[in-house]
Image (spheres, rainbow, N blue to C red):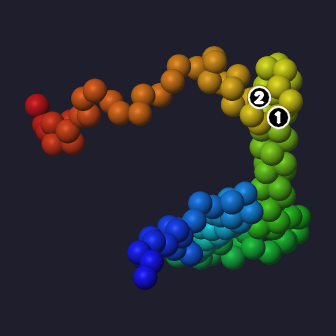
Amino acid sequence: MEPARPAAAEPAPGLEAPGPRDDRLFLVKGGLFLGAVAAAGMLAGFGTTLSLAKKRSPEWFNKGSMATASLPESGSSLALRALGWGSLYAWCGVGVISFAVWKALGVHSMKDFRSKMQSIFPAIPKKSESAPEWEEALKSK
């Protein structure tokens, strides 16, 4: 009889190193989750603010929701128009600033950008020497 040879160590199906496809799927799932949480938070905040405004002064709330002869544009349409323009300005502003930084640094990919940022800014230490204790920081003097 032959001596039993140890079988080649095969990793369990769930313990394999993730491949590039798995990484991309993880990033997409993470982005969708964060987007959904942000959208839910914005809707909850907007709904809460709207209900609070209606509860505080229902007469003024109803006046602002419909256009009249004295007010040619309703408050809600004015607010939506302002939100649209504000969002457009915010997106364009962030895009222009990002593009300007990208061109000023002279990078051509995200890896170049990362290495450039690491050379400009100091490294963040992995472990701080002395972490502050919350009890000491929050203790009244």
Judge from the rendering whether residue 24 lies leftward or rightward of residue 38; answer left or right. Answer: right
Q: x%, y% of residue 51?
A: 57, 75
Q: Tell me the number on the disc at residue 109.
A: 1
Amino acid on which disc 1 is placed: Ser
Q: x%, y% of residue 100?
A: 83, 26
How many numbered badges does the structure rendering display?
2
Q: x%, y% of residue 81?
A: 84, 58
**Residue beneath disc 2:** 112
Judge from the rendering whether residue 37 lies leftward or rightward of residue 66; answer left or right. Answer: left
State the separation of the CA atoms marked 2 and 1: 5 Å
Q: Residue at x 28, y 27 (%)?
A: 129
Q: Residue at x 43, y 82 (%)?
A: 1
Q: x%, y% of residue 20?
A: 72, 57
Judge from the rendering whether residue 132 lies leftward or rightward of residue 91; answer left or right. Answer: left
Q: Is residue 112 above or below residue 75?
A: above
Amino acid on which disc 2 is placed: Asp
Q: Decide: marks 2, 1 in contact (CB < 8 A)?
A: yes
Q: Quadrant of the C terminus?
A: top left
